[in-house]
Amino acid sequence: MSIRLVVYIFTFVMIFITGIFVLLNNNKNRLNQTFFAFVMSVDLWVLSLIFADNSSSLEIVMFASRAAYVSAILMSLFNLYLSFIFPNKHFRIKKLALILISIPSILLIAFAGTSLVVQSVSIKDYGADVVTGPVYILFFIYLVIYLGMAMYNYTMSFRKSKGAVKLQVQFLLIGILISAVIAAITNLVLVVMGFSSLGYLGPPSLLLFIGLTAFAIVKHKLFDIRAVVARSVTYVLTIGVIAILYSLIAFQLTGRFVDSLSHGWRDAIYVVLTVILAFTFSPLRRFFERISNRIFYRDRYDSQELVNEIGRILASEIDLDKVSSRVLHELSKQIKIDKAEIIVFGENQLFYENNVFKNGGGQISPEELSKLGRIIVVRDDIQTSDKKELMQKYGISISLALRTSEKFIGYMLLGEKKSGDIYNDQDLAVLKIIANEVSVAMANALSYKEIQLFSETLAEKVRQRTAQLRHANDQLKELDKAKDEFISMASHQLRTPLTTVKGYASMLQEGDFGKLTKEQMKIVEQTLDGSNRMARLIDDLLNVSRMDANRFFLEGNQVDLNKLVPEELEQLKSFAESKKVELTYAAPKQKIPIIQIDENKTRQVVMNLVDNALHYSAPPAGGGHVKVSLVLNGDFVEFWVADDGIGVPAAVQKKLFTKMFRAPNAQGVRPDGTGLGLYLVKRVVEQQGGEIWFESKEGKGSTFGFKLPLSGIPKQVLEESKKIGAKVAASHAKSGT
Amino acid sequence: MSKVVLLVEDNDFIRNMYQLKLAKADFSVVEAVDGQMALDKIGEHKPDLVLLDLMMPNVNGIDVLKSLKKQNLVPGLPVIVLTNVMDPQTIEQAKELGARDYIVKTDLTPSQVVEKLQPFLK
C-alpha cells in the first residue's frame, strides 16, 4: 500500500462527495449540473490513475492510462462549459457554439483510445510510465486552448463582476490557478520531460479547485472574510483529523496484518475504511464548525432566537409605533447595526417613520425611496448606480421592501454592522424571514391605526352632533320656559276676571244682593260651577306646562283630608244634581291624621277624579251613581271613586294616563275634554309618594283609587321642589313678573 | 268694637266685592289701591289685619311686606296675601317676609276668605 494509493483513494472519495453535495444542493440549477459533470470527469480521471498506477496487468494499465486521457479531455470540456455559466445560472453562449466546442473533444476522445496518444506503458516502481504517441501534442494543445479559453472566460467574469460575485469568481480562479499549476507541472511538464513519478500530486491539487468552486457555487453569498477563514479552518481540521485517523488505522492494520492478509482482503479493508471515514466527515465538520464559530464569531447572534424574539414582539403589539420601535431595537441589539429604520407608506405618501441610532445622513425622501424598488437590495451586491449612491448617502446597507401578498407597506432600512462586517447570506435569510413577518404585522398595525383614526373621527362627529343636540335642547328648554312664563302670566290674567265672576256669583247665592228667585238661584249656581271648572282648567294647564318645562313642584302643607274631600265634593254637588248623578260619600271610620301634602294639587286630584266620574256616569250613557270613599289603611290613606259609567275600553286602558290621551267612548260623551286631568292626577299622586290604580269594564263602570303615605311627601321630592321653585322664581324675577 | 281690616287691591271691582263681604261680616274696612297708599293707611288707621294683593302698580305687595318688616310692624300685624299669583317662590318669599297666609283668589269665594281671617283676629 503506497502513499500514492492512499492519496488517490482519498481524493477520489472527497471529489465524489463534493460533486454529490453540490448537485444535491440544487439539482435543478444548470450551474450545479455542469459543475457535477465536471467533477465526475475529474473523479473518472482520478479513478483511472488509481488503476493505472496500481495494477500489475499491462493491459489494465494501458486501458486506465487511456481512460485518464479521455477523462482529461472531458474535464477540459466541462471546465470550459463551467466557465461560460459560472457564476450565473445560464450559459452565456448559444447552444450551437456549445456543440461546436464539443466537437474537438469528441474527436480527441476517439484518438485517445488508440496508440496515437498513448503509445505504450510500462510499470515502474512508482506506478505506470506512459510513452506518448504522435497525437499527444494535439492533446496538449487542446488542453492548453480549452484551459486558456476557460481562463479567459473566468477572467472576464472576474473583471465584469462586482461585490460578492467578484469574490465568487475569485475563489474559483485561485482554485484553478493552484490546481492548474500543480497539475501542469506534474502531469504535463514532467511527463514530457520523462518523469511521471510525481504525477500523483496532480489529483489532490484539483481537490483545492473543486473545493473552492463548490464553495463558491453553494455559498455564493458568503463573502464575509471571517466566514471563509472560519470555514477553511473547519475543513482543514476536519480533513486533517480524517487523514491522520485514516493513516493511523490503515498503516497500523497493514503493518500488523500485511503478511497474514491476502492482497484482495487488504484492499477491501481500505475501501470499508474509506467509506466509514467518509461518513464521519459530516459530524466532524459540524464539530469543528462549532469550535471555529466560537473563535471567530464571539458577537454572533442566534438567528433562531432573533426570529423567535421578533415573532414574540409582533404577536404582543398591535400599535404601529410600538411594534416598529421594538422590532428595530431588537434588530439593532442582536445584529449590532448602527442604524435601523422602518418607513411605512399609506396612499403612496410617507405615512410613518421610525428609526433607532440614526447617525446623520438626513431623512431619505419618498422619491428617493421609490428608487430602491420594491425588492430586497443589498448595497454590496449591486453595481455602481443611483441606488448604490443613494444607499451610501444615507448609510443604508440593506433595503428590505415590506409587502404582503396584497399590498406594499414600506421599507425596512438597515445600516452597517458596527463590527464593519458585511451581511452574510445567513443574515439575509434571517432578515428576509423577519421582513415578511414585519410586513404582515405592519399591515395589521396599519389597519388597526386606520380603525383608531376612524373611531376618533367618529367620536369627533358624535361630539359635534351632541353639541348640536345640546344646543337644540337648550333652545327647546328656552322655548318651554318662555311658554311656561307665558302660561303663568296668562293664567294670572285669566284669574282676575274669574275672581269677580266666582266671587259675585257666590255672593249672589249667599243672598248678599237680595233674595233670588229659584230660577235665578239655579243660574247663579251654574255660573259658580262654571267658574270653578274654569279655575281648575287654568290650574291643569299651568301644571302641565310646568311639567313640560321641568318646573313642576310640590308644596308641603298640613292637610286634613277629612275636611278637604267633603269640601271638594260640596263644590260638585250642584253639578252632580244638574247631571242627575247620585253622588255619595263614605267618610272614614277612623279619622285620617293630618298629613304633609300639597293641598291645592291634592284638591285638584280629588276634583279631577270625581268630576270625571260624574261626567262619564251621567245618564243616559251611564247609570248615574258615583260613590266616593276615604279609608285609613295601615300607613296609607286611600281614596276611592266608583262609578257605573261608560267605563274604559280594555284596549286603551294602558294609555289612560298618557298626556292628551282620550278614550274613544269618552270623546263621544265629552267632546271638549283636554286629556290632561288623569295625566296630572297620576303625576301628583306619584310625586307625593303615592300610587294610583283603576279597574274598569266598558259599559259597566270604573273604579279609580289612589293612596298616599301618612308620612307625607318624601323629603327628597320636597327638596327638589324647592330648588325648582327657586329657579322658576329667578327666571320670573328676570322677566319682571 | 269691630276690627279694622285694610284691603289692598288695585282692581276696583274685586276690591268692592271683598269690601262688601267684609262689611257684611262686621269689619271696619279701610281700602287702599296700591302699595304706597297701603303703607300710608297702615300708619294712619292702625288696622288689625291687612289683606294684601301682590301685583299692583308702583309699589307692589312684596315691597309693602318688605317695608313692614323693615319697620318691624310685622309681628303685631297679621298680613294675609290675597292674590292670583301662584309662583312658589313668590309664595315662599311672602311667607318669609311675614305673611301669615297666602290665598289664591279663585280658589275661594269671598265668604270663604272672610272665614280664613277669623283665626288671625282673636
Image (spheres, grey):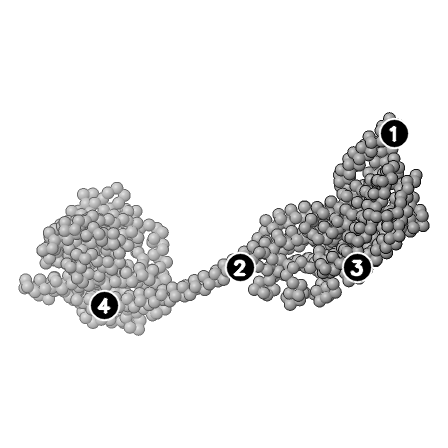
| Type of the residue with mark 2 | Glu
Q: Secondary structure at mark 3?
A: helix
Rendered image: mark on residue A153? 3
Residue A84 image position (x, y, % from top left):
76, 57
Which residue bears the numbered disc 2?
Answer: A450
Rendered image: mark on residue A258? 1
Residue drawn where x is 24% and y is 49% of the image:
A693
Q: Nearer the viewer, mark 4 or mark 1?
A: 1
Q: Secondary structure at mark 2?
A: helix
Q: Quick check: A305 left or right of A135?
A: left
Label 2 or label 3, whichever comes before in sequence order: 3
| Type of the residue with mark 4 | Leu
Q: Nearer the viewer, mark 4 or mark 3?
A: 3
Crowding at mark 1 (Cα within 10 Å: few <14, some 14-19, many 20+):
some
Which of the 4 image quarters holds residue B26? bottom left
Q: Secondary structure at mark 1?
A: loop
Work out whether residue B15 can be spotted.
yes
Front in this rendered view, residue A219 or A502:
A219
Front in this rendered view, residue A379 or A618:
A379
Label 4 or label 3, whichever comes before in sequence order: 3
Crowding at mark 3 (Cα within 10 Å: few <14, some 14-19, many 20+):
many
Check if mark 1's residue and mark 3's residue have beta carbons within 8 Å: no
Which residue bears the numbered disc 4?
Answer: A494
Residue A720 image position (x, y, % from top left):
36, 55
| Type of the residue with mark 3 | Asn
Chain under label 4? A
Label 1 or label 2, whichever comes before in sequence order: 1
The residues bearing labels 4 and 3 have C-alpha atoms spaced at a distance of 119 Å
